[in-house]
Amino acid sequence: MRRMIPLSRPDITEEDIEEVVEVLKSGRLSLGDHTRKFGEVVAQYVGAKYGWPVSSGTAALHLILESLDVKEGDIVLVPSFTFIASVNVILMKKAIPVFVDVDRRTLNVSSETLEDAIKRCLKGFKQGDVHIKGVPGFFMAVDVFGHPLDWDGVLEVCSRYGITVIEDSCEALGSEYKGKKTGTFGVAGAFAFYPNKQITTGEGGVVVTDSEQIFTLVKSMSNQGRGEDEKWLYHVRFGYNYRIDEMSAALGLSQMERIDRILEKRSEAADRYSKMLKDLPWVQVPVVEEYVTRMSWFVYVIRLNGPDRDRVMKYMEEKGVQVRNYFHPVHLQPFYEKTFGNMRGLLPVTEEESKKTLALPFFTNISPKEQERVVEILEEAVERVG
Ligand SMILES: Cc1ncc(COP(=O)(O)O)c(C=O)c1O
Protein backbone atom coordinates (compact mmCIF):
# COMPACT_ATOMS: atom_id res chain seq x y z
CA MET A 1 0.00 0.00 0.00
CA ARG A 2 1.49 3.33 -1.05
CA ARG A 3 1.60 6.23 1.39
CA MET A 4 -0.82 9.05 0.84
CA ILE A 5 0.68 12.24 -0.57
CA PRO A 6 -0.78 15.06 1.52
CA LEU A 7 -1.86 18.42 0.16
CA SER A 8 0.56 20.11 2.53
CA ARG A 9 3.04 19.21 5.24
CA PRO A 10 4.82 21.61 7.60
CA ASP A 11 8.61 21.77 7.56
CA ILE A 12 9.69 21.34 11.20
CA THR A 13 13.38 20.90 12.02
CA GLU A 14 15.17 19.76 15.18
CA GLU A 15 16.17 23.40 15.78
CA ASP A 16 12.50 24.44 15.63
CA ILE A 17 11.65 21.81 18.22
CA GLU A 18 14.51 22.87 20.49
CA GLU A 19 13.40 26.50 20.39
CA VAL A 20 9.88 25.55 21.44
CA VAL A 21 11.13 23.24 24.19
CA GLU A 22 13.35 26.06 25.52
CA VAL A 23 10.28 28.26 25.91
CA LEU A 24 8.41 25.49 27.72
CA LYS A 25 11.33 25.13 30.11
CA SER A 26 11.56 28.88 30.69
CA GLY A 27 8.14 29.12 32.32
CA ARG A 28 7.25 32.27 30.34
CA LEU A 29 4.58 31.04 27.96
CA SER A 30 2.84 34.24 26.92
CA LEU A 31 3.67 37.92 26.34
CA GLY A 32 7.41 37.46 26.44
CA ASP A 33 10.35 38.46 24.30
CA HIS A 34 9.63 35.92 21.55
CA THR A 35 6.31 37.56 20.78
CA ARG A 36 7.74 41.06 20.50
CA LYS A 37 10.77 39.84 18.55
CA PHE A 38 8.72 37.74 16.10
CA GLY A 39 6.70 40.85 15.19
CA GLU A 40 9.89 42.86 14.71
CA VAL A 41 11.55 40.18 12.57
CA VAL A 42 8.56 39.84 10.22
CA ALA A 43 8.23 43.62 9.94
CA GLN A 44 11.91 44.02 9.18
CA TYR A 45 11.80 41.21 6.63
CA VAL A 46 8.96 42.81 4.65
CA GLY A 47 10.23 46.36 5.13
CA ALA A 48 7.53 47.70 7.45
CA LYS A 49 8.14 49.86 10.51
CA TYR A 50 6.04 47.83 12.93
CA GLY A 51 4.85 44.26 13.32
CA TRP A 52 2.70 42.63 15.98
CA PRO A 53 1.95 38.90 16.16
CA VAL A 54 -1.52 37.64 16.98
CA SER A 55 -3.33 34.32 17.26
CA SER A 56 -4.27 33.92 13.57
CA GLY A 57 -4.42 35.60 10.20
CA THR A 58 -8.13 36.15 10.76
CA ALA A 59 -7.39 37.96 14.05
CA ALA A 60 -4.78 40.07 12.25
CA LEU A 61 -7.31 41.17 9.60
CA HIS A 62 -10.04 41.77 12.17
CA LEU A 63 -7.75 43.97 14.26
CA ILE A 64 -6.71 45.99 11.22
CA LEU A 65 -10.38 46.72 10.48
CA GLU A 66 -10.93 47.57 14.17
CA SER A 67 -8.00 49.95 14.20
CA LEU A 68 -9.33 51.71 11.08
CA ASP A 69 -12.68 52.15 12.75
CA VAL A 70 -14.62 50.53 9.92
CA LYS A 71 -18.28 51.25 10.71
CA GLU A 72 -21.57 49.46 10.31
CA GLY A 73 -22.78 49.85 6.72
CA ASP A 74 -19.39 50.86 5.29
CA ILE A 75 -18.71 49.34 1.88
CA VAL A 76 -15.60 47.16 1.74
CA LEU A 77 -14.50 45.86 -1.65
CA VAL A 78 -13.16 42.31 -1.56
CA PRO A 79 -12.58 39.43 -3.99
CA SER A 80 -14.81 36.40 -3.75
CA PHE A 81 -11.96 34.23 -5.03
CA THR A 82 -10.26 34.03 -1.62
CA PHE A 83 -10.33 32.21 1.69
CA ILE A 84 -13.54 32.98 3.57
CA ALA A 85 -11.78 34.84 6.41
CA SER A 86 -11.00 37.81 4.08
CA VAL A 87 -14.75 38.42 3.92
CA ASN A 88 -15.89 37.20 7.34
CA VAL A 89 -13.84 39.91 9.07
CA ILE A 90 -15.87 42.50 7.14
CA LEU A 91 -19.08 41.00 8.55
CA MET A 92 -17.53 41.05 12.03
CA LYS A 93 -17.58 44.85 11.69
CA LYS A 94 -21.15 44.82 10.31
CA ALA A 95 -19.74 46.41 7.17
CA ILE A 96 -20.93 45.38 3.68
CA PRO A 97 -18.64 43.26 1.54
CA VAL A 98 -18.95 44.10 -2.14
CA PHE A 99 -17.49 41.33 -4.24
CA VAL A 100 -15.00 42.14 -6.98
CA ASP A 101 -14.25 39.89 -9.94
CA VAL A 102 -10.71 38.82 -10.85
CA ASP A 103 -8.34 38.83 -13.76
CA ARG A 104 -8.50 35.56 -15.67
CA ARG A 105 -4.74 35.04 -15.81
CA THR A 106 -3.67 35.72 -12.24
CA LEU A 107 -7.01 35.16 -10.43
CA ASN A 108 -6.27 38.40 -8.59
CA VAL A 109 -8.33 41.58 -8.55
CA SER A 110 -7.03 43.95 -11.24
CA SER A 111 -7.35 47.72 -11.60
CA GLU A 112 -10.10 47.10 -14.21
CA THR A 113 -12.20 44.71 -12.14
CA LEU A 114 -11.77 46.98 -9.13
CA GLU A 115 -12.91 50.07 -10.99
CA ASP A 116 -15.90 48.18 -12.42
CA ALA A 117 -17.00 47.29 -8.89
CA ILE A 118 -16.51 50.86 -7.67
CA LYS A 119 -18.62 52.21 -10.52
CA ARG A 120 -21.34 49.67 -9.73
CA CYS A 121 -21.41 50.87 -6.12
CA LEU A 122 -21.59 54.53 -7.13
CA LYS A 123 -24.44 53.88 -9.57
CA GLY A 124 -26.28 51.47 -7.28
CA PHE A 125 -26.88 47.77 -7.88
CA LYS A 126 -28.32 44.64 -6.34
CA GLN A 127 -25.89 42.15 -4.82
CA GLY A 128 -28.16 39.19 -4.23
CA ASP A 129 -31.10 40.62 -2.26
CA VAL A 130 -29.17 43.62 -0.97
CA HIS A 131 -29.34 47.01 -2.64
CA ILE A 132 -25.92 48.65 -2.61
CA LYS A 133 -25.34 52.31 -3.31
CA GLY A 134 -22.53 54.44 -1.98
CA VAL A 135 -18.85 55.27 -2.05
CA PRO A 136 -16.66 52.33 -1.06
CA GLY A 137 -14.40 53.26 1.83
CA PHE A 138 -12.05 50.28 1.85
CA PHE A 139 -10.50 47.60 -0.32
CA MET A 140 -9.50 44.27 1.23
CA ALA A 141 -6.82 43.30 -1.27
CA VAL A 142 -5.74 39.65 -1.40
CA ASP A 143 -2.43 38.47 -2.90
CA VAL A 144 -4.04 35.21 -3.84
CA PHE A 145 -1.93 32.01 -3.69
CA GLY A 146 1.10 34.25 -3.01
CA HIS A 147 0.88 36.14 -6.31
CA PRO A 148 0.97 39.92 -5.78
CA LEU A 149 -1.68 42.16 -7.26
CA ASP A 150 -0.59 44.51 -10.03
CA TRP A 151 -0.19 47.14 -7.37
CA ASP A 152 0.64 50.25 -9.44
CA GLY A 153 -2.70 50.19 -11.23
CA VAL A 154 -4.68 49.09 -8.17
CA LEU A 155 -3.23 51.81 -5.95
CA GLU A 156 -3.85 54.44 -8.61
CA VAL A 157 -7.55 53.49 -8.73
CA CYS A 158 -7.81 53.46 -4.94
CA SER A 159 -6.19 56.85 -4.56
CA ARG A 160 -8.44 58.34 -7.27
CA TYR A 161 -11.56 57.22 -5.36
CA GLY A 162 -10.14 57.85 -1.87
CA ILE A 163 -10.25 54.18 -0.89
CA THR A 164 -8.17 52.86 2.02
CA VAL A 165 -6.31 49.63 1.23
CA ILE A 166 -5.90 46.76 3.67
CA GLU A 167 -3.63 44.00 2.40
CA ASP A 168 -4.57 40.42 3.11
CA SER A 169 -1.16 38.98 2.40
CA CYS A 170 -1.87 35.88 4.47
CA GLU A 171 -0.74 33.66 1.59
CA ALA A 172 2.17 35.75 0.36
CA LEU A 173 4.95 36.17 2.93
CA GLY A 174 8.08 37.03 0.95
CA SER A 175 6.50 37.78 -2.43
CA GLU A 176 7.68 40.93 -4.13
CA TYR A 177 6.06 43.31 -6.57
CA LYS A 178 8.74 45.27 -8.45
CA GLY A 179 11.17 44.72 -5.58
CA LYS A 180 8.77 45.65 -2.75
CA LYS A 181 7.43 42.98 -0.45
CA THR A 182 3.73 42.25 -0.19
CA GLY A 183 2.00 43.23 3.03
CA THR A 184 3.34 46.77 2.64
CA PHE A 185 1.06 48.16 -0.07
CA GLY A 186 -1.88 49.20 2.10
CA VAL A 187 -2.15 51.03 5.42
CA ALA A 188 -1.56 47.65 7.07
CA GLY A 189 -1.00 44.06 6.01
CA ALA A 190 -1.73 40.65 7.50
CA PHE A 191 0.19 37.37 7.32
CA ALA A 192 -0.98 33.94 8.45
CA PHE A 193 0.93 30.94 9.73
CA TYR A 194 -1.44 27.97 9.72
CA PRO A 195 0.56 24.76 9.05
CA ASN A 196 -0.10 24.84 5.30
CA LYS A 197 1.60 28.23 4.94
CA GLN A 198 5.16 29.02 3.82
CA ILE A 199 6.20 29.24 7.47
CA THR A 200 4.09 28.09 10.37
CA THR A 201 3.52 28.85 14.02
CA GLY A 202 0.79 26.20 14.36
CA GLU A 203 -1.82 28.93 14.58
CA GLY A 204 -0.78 32.55 14.28
CA GLY A 205 -0.58 35.73 12.27
CA VAL A 206 1.20 39.07 12.15
CA VAL A 207 0.01 42.60 11.43
CA VAL A 208 2.57 44.84 9.72
CA THR A 209 2.21 48.57 9.26
CA ASP A 210 4.13 51.85 9.00
CA SER A 211 1.50 53.55 11.16
CA GLU A 212 2.37 53.91 14.81
CA GLN A 213 -1.31 54.46 15.56
CA ILE A 214 -2.44 51.21 13.91
CA PHE A 215 0.39 49.32 15.60
CA THR A 216 -0.53 50.69 19.04
CA LEU A 217 -4.21 49.89 18.58
CA VAL A 218 -3.57 46.39 17.22
CA LYS A 219 -1.19 45.57 20.07
CA SER A 220 -3.61 46.86 22.68
CA MET A 221 -6.76 45.30 21.21
CA SER A 222 -5.04 41.93 20.81
CA ASN A 223 -4.52 42.04 24.58
CA GLN A 224 -7.98 42.92 25.93
CA GLY A 225 -7.56 46.65 25.31
CA ARG A 226 -4.79 47.10 27.86
CA GLY A 227 -2.92 50.39 27.64
CA GLU A 228 0.65 50.97 26.60
CA ASP A 229 1.92 50.23 30.12
CA GLU A 230 0.21 46.80 29.84
CA LYS A 231 -1.08 47.19 33.42
CA TRP A 232 -2.91 43.93 34.06
CA LEU A 233 -6.43 44.71 35.24
CA TYR A 234 -6.65 48.07 33.54
CA HIS A 235 -8.29 48.43 30.14
CA VAL A 236 -8.28 51.66 28.14
CA ARG A 237 -10.30 50.45 25.15
CA PHE A 238 -12.35 47.52 23.88
CA GLY A 239 -10.28 44.47 23.06
CA TYR A 240 -9.98 40.75 22.49
CA ASN A 241 -7.74 37.92 23.49
CA TYR A 242 -5.96 37.55 20.16
CA ARG A 243 -2.57 36.90 21.76
CA ILE A 244 -0.14 34.43 20.22
CA ASP A 245 1.68 32.28 22.77
CA GLU A 246 5.43 32.21 23.26
CA MET A 247 5.85 28.67 21.91
CA SER A 248 4.23 29.67 18.63
CA ALA A 249 6.26 32.88 18.43
CA ALA A 250 9.48 30.92 19.08
CA LEU A 251 8.58 28.49 16.30
CA GLY A 252 7.90 31.42 13.98
CA LEU A 253 11.25 33.02 14.82
CA SER A 254 13.06 29.77 14.18
CA GLN A 255 11.30 29.35 10.82
CA MET A 256 12.02 32.95 9.82
CA GLU A 257 15.74 32.21 10.13
CA ARG A 258 15.51 30.04 7.03
CA ILE A 259 12.71 31.80 5.16
CA ASP A 260 14.83 32.39 2.07
CA ARG A 261 15.76 28.72 1.75
CA ILE A 262 12.12 27.73 2.32
CA LEU A 263 10.93 30.02 -0.45
CA GLU A 264 13.69 28.77 -2.76
CA LYS A 265 12.70 25.15 -2.21
CA ARG A 266 9.05 25.97 -2.86
CA SER A 267 10.03 27.78 -6.04
CA GLU A 268 12.04 24.78 -7.19
CA ALA A 269 9.06 22.50 -6.51
CA ALA A 270 6.74 24.81 -8.45
CA ASP A 271 9.16 24.88 -11.39
CA ARG A 272 9.35 21.10 -11.36
CA TYR A 273 5.56 20.81 -11.56
CA SER A 274 5.39 23.37 -14.36
CA LYS A 275 7.99 21.42 -16.36
CA MET A 276 6.25 18.08 -15.76
CA LEU A 277 2.88 19.50 -16.80
CA LYS A 278 3.84 21.65 -19.72
CA ASP A 279 2.96 19.13 -22.44
CA LEU A 280 -0.48 18.22 -21.11
CA PRO A 281 -2.82 20.25 -23.33
CA TRP A 282 -5.68 20.24 -20.81
CA VAL A 283 -3.58 21.68 -17.98
CA GLN A 284 -3.11 25.40 -17.43
CA VAL A 285 -0.19 25.97 -15.06
CA PRO A 286 -0.14 29.01 -12.76
CA VAL A 287 1.28 32.21 -14.24
CA VAL A 288 3.82 34.44 -12.56
CA GLU A 289 3.59 37.91 -14.07
CA GLU A 290 6.71 39.86 -14.99
CA TYR A 291 6.16 42.45 -12.28
CA VAL A 292 6.63 39.71 -9.68
CA THR A 293 10.29 39.99 -8.72
CA ARG A 294 9.90 37.19 -6.19
CA MET A 295 7.11 34.67 -5.99
CA SER A 296 6.44 33.12 -2.60
CA TRP A 297 4.49 29.99 -3.51
CA PHE A 298 1.68 29.18 -1.09
CA VAL A 299 -0.10 26.53 -3.16
CA TYR A 300 0.33 25.17 -6.67
CA VAL A 301 -3.02 25.51 -8.42
CA ILE A 302 -3.58 24.29 -11.95
CA ARG A 303 -6.71 24.72 -14.05
CA LEU A 304 -8.25 21.84 -15.96
CA ASN A 305 -9.51 22.99 -19.34
CA GLY A 306 -11.87 20.26 -20.48
CA PRO A 307 -11.67 17.41 -17.95
CA ASP A 308 -14.30 17.24 -15.18
CA ARG A 309 -12.45 18.74 -12.21
CA ASP A 310 -14.63 17.20 -9.50
CA ARG A 311 -14.39 13.69 -10.91
CA VAL A 312 -10.63 14.05 -11.32
CA MET A 313 -10.36 15.21 -7.70
CA LYS A 314 -12.36 12.26 -6.43
CA TYR A 315 -10.23 9.79 -8.40
CA MET A 316 -6.97 11.31 -7.16
CA GLU A 317 -8.14 11.26 -3.55
CA GLU A 318 -9.09 7.59 -3.91
CA LYS A 319 -5.59 6.91 -5.20
CA GLY A 320 -4.03 8.58 -2.15
CA VAL A 321 -3.21 11.98 -3.63
CA GLN A 322 -4.78 14.77 -1.65
CA VAL A 323 -6.04 17.64 -3.79
CA ARG A 324 -8.29 20.64 -3.18
CA ASN A 325 -10.62 22.93 -5.13
CA TYR A 326 -8.97 26.22 -4.09
CA PHE A 327 -11.20 28.34 -4.05
CA HIS A 328 -14.91 27.78 -4.04
CA PRO A 329 -15.99 31.43 -4.33
CA VAL A 330 -17.15 33.08 -1.11
CA HIS A 331 -20.27 34.60 -2.70
CA LEU A 332 -21.46 31.06 -3.55
CA GLN A 333 -20.82 29.63 -0.07
CA PRO A 334 -24.04 28.47 1.64
CA PHE A 335 -23.69 30.96 4.50
CA TYR A 336 -23.26 33.91 2.13
CA GLU A 337 -26.20 32.80 -0.01
CA LYS A 338 -28.32 32.59 3.15
CA THR A 339 -27.19 36.04 4.25
CA PHE A 340 -27.27 37.97 0.97
CA GLY A 341 -29.44 35.85 -1.31
CA ASN A 342 -28.54 34.19 -4.60
CA MET A 343 -25.54 35.95 -6.12
CA ARG A 344 -24.86 33.48 -8.95
CA GLY A 345 -23.88 35.33 -12.11
CA LEU A 346 -22.43 38.31 -10.24
CA LEU A 347 -18.77 37.49 -11.00
CA PRO A 348 -18.41 35.71 -14.36
CA VAL A 349 -14.64 35.14 -14.31
CA THR A 350 -14.53 34.00 -10.69
CA GLU A 351 -17.43 31.62 -11.30
CA GLU A 352 -16.00 30.14 -14.50
CA GLU A 353 -12.41 29.76 -13.41
CA SER A 354 -13.13 28.43 -9.93
CA LYS A 355 -14.82 25.41 -11.51
CA LYS A 356 -11.48 24.45 -13.08
CA THR A 357 -9.01 25.02 -10.27
CA LEU A 358 -7.19 22.14 -8.66
CA ALA A 359 -4.52 22.50 -5.96
CA LEU A 360 -1.93 19.73 -6.19
CA PRO A 361 0.07 18.49 -3.18
CA PHE A 362 2.61 21.21 -2.48
CA PHE A 363 4.95 21.81 0.44
CA THR A 364 8.52 22.86 1.15
CA ASN A 365 10.03 19.37 1.18
CA ILE A 366 7.93 17.67 -1.47
CA SER A 367 10.25 15.34 -3.39
CA PRO A 368 10.54 15.07 -7.18
CA LYS A 369 9.37 11.46 -6.80
CA GLU A 370 6.21 12.52 -4.99
CA GLN A 371 5.56 15.13 -7.67
CA GLU A 372 6.04 12.54 -10.42
CA ARG A 373 3.52 10.31 -8.70
CA VAL A 374 1.02 13.22 -8.45
CA VAL A 375 1.33 13.95 -12.16
CA GLU A 376 1.05 10.25 -13.01
CA ILE A 377 -2.18 9.96 -11.01
CA LEU A 378 -3.49 13.19 -12.50
CA GLU A 379 -2.95 11.86 -16.03
CA GLU A 380 -4.52 8.55 -15.08
CA ALA A 381 -7.52 10.34 -13.56
CA VAL A 382 -8.12 12.39 -16.69
CA GLU A 383 -7.79 9.32 -18.88
CA ARG A 384 -10.21 7.24 -16.80
CA VAL A 385 -12.81 9.68 -15.45
CA GLY A 386 -12.08 13.15 -16.86
C1 LIG B 1 -6.26 34.79 2.02
C2 LIG B 1 -6.36 34.39 3.46
N1 LIG B 1 -6.89 35.27 4.33
C3 LIG B 1 -6.99 34.98 5.64
C4 LIG B 1 -6.58 33.77 6.15
C5 LIG B 1 -6.82 33.47 7.59
O1 LIG B 1 -5.74 33.02 8.30
P1 LIG B 1 -5.95 32.04 9.56
O2 LIG B 1 -6.38 30.72 9.03
O3 LIG B 1 -4.59 32.03 10.20
O4 LIG B 1 -6.96 32.68 10.45
C6 LIG B 1 -6.01 32.83 5.29
C7 LIG B 1 -5.51 31.55 5.80
O5 LIG B 1 -5.84 30.47 5.48
C8 LIG B 1 -5.94 33.13 3.90
O6 LIG B 1 -5.47 32.23 3.03
Image: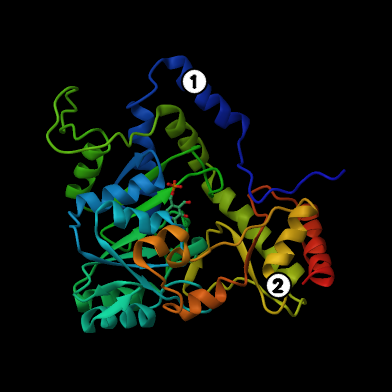
Colour mode? rainbow
Q: Amino acid at mark 2?
A: Asp
Mark 2 CB in 8 Å range of ligand 1?
no
State which quarter of the image contains the C terminus.
Answer: bottom right
Instruction: Specify the quadrant of the image occupied by residue 215.
Output: top left
- Residue type at mark 1 is Glu
In the displayed structure, does residue 32 sit left or right of residue 255?
A: left
* Front position in the image: 343 or 45: 343
Q: Residue 94: percent from the left, percent from the top?
A: 24, 56
Label 2's element? loop
Residue denoted by label 2: 308
SS of the residue under disc 1:
helix
Q: Residue 104, image x and y in percent?
A: 51, 79
Residue at the location (70% across, 61% down)? Answer: 313
Label number found at residue 217: none
Q: Is residue 94 in view?
A: yes
Q: Going from the N terminus, do you reach mark 1 or mark 2 first?
A: 1
Number of the front mark, 1 or 2? 2
User: Does residue 13 sit above or below 167 in this rendering?
Assistant: above
> Residue at the spot x=82%, y=62% of the render?
376
Q: Which residue is most to the right?
A: 1
Residue 345 x/y as whole percent: 45, 79
Residue with the mark numbered 1: 22
| Label 2 packing within 10 angstroms: few (<14), some (14-19), many (20+) | some
Judge from the rendering whether residue 95 lies leftward or rightward of residue 324; answer left or right. left
Q: Quadrant of residue 276?
A: bottom right
Rendering coords of residue 160 (x, y %): 21, 79
